[in-house]
Image (spheres, rainbow, N blue to C red):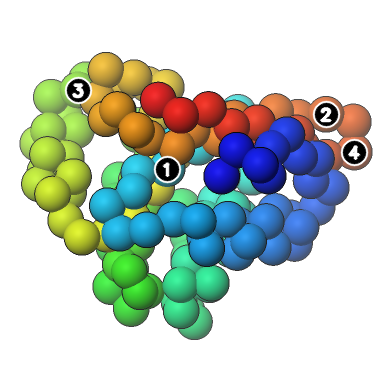
Amino acid sequence: MQQYFPVEIDSPEAMKDFGSHISRKLASGDVLALIGDLGAGKTHLTQGIAQALGREEAVTSPTFALVNEYTDCSPELIHFDWYRMETPEELLAIGWEDYLEREAILVIEWPDRFPEMIPTGTHCIHIEHINGGRRLSYALA
């Protein structure tokens, strides 16, 4: 996936398109960590991934639900938002370790809240605000 970065994105639609593009490089069992401030485009990127995996209905941020499961995607897509969690124990209480065993793609918003909970081999996309858009960079955890 490294070959697609760094990249500059100038609109929410372009962010969704980029999500669709990188979805082809994700496989069942992959974890994708999206790191960026409020309004950076993490959910738009996830929407593009979900759409490319076959999701036809809306994809929303799981800020209040903490996790949204999209079983109509192939492979399944499980979307987390760790923003409201206070401790790693809360993450474990919602079944984090069980989710890691699922045959699904896991997308995490706000993974920097609990970096110790991110498995080795996680794809990390950093999204930063720039004039006129966003700059995305990539690292492998």
Give the structural element (helix, strand or loop) at label 4: loop
- Point out residue 32 in the picture as x, y percentages from the top left corner: 42, 43
- Image side of residue 112 versus residue 95, left or right: right
Q: Are there few (<14), some (14-19), or many (20+) residues within 10 Å of tag 1?
A: many
The amino acid type of the residue labelled 2 equals Ile
In the picture, measured across the screen, residue 21 lies left or right of residue 29, that is right
* Residue 7, placed above or below residue 140: below
The mark nearer the N terminus, 4 or 3, is: 3
Q: Is the C-beta separation of discs 1 and 3 under 8 Å?
A: no
Find residue 50 and report its horizontal and vertical position in percent: 48, 67
- What is the crowding at mark 2: few (fewer than 14 residues within 10 Å), some, or many (at least 20)? few
Kind of residue indicated by mark 4: Gly
Query: Which residue is identified by label 3?
Result: 88
- Residue located at (46% from left, 79% from top): 54
Q: CA distance from mark 1 to mark 3?
A: 18 Å
Residue topped by disc 2: 130
Snapshot quadrant of residue 68: bottom left
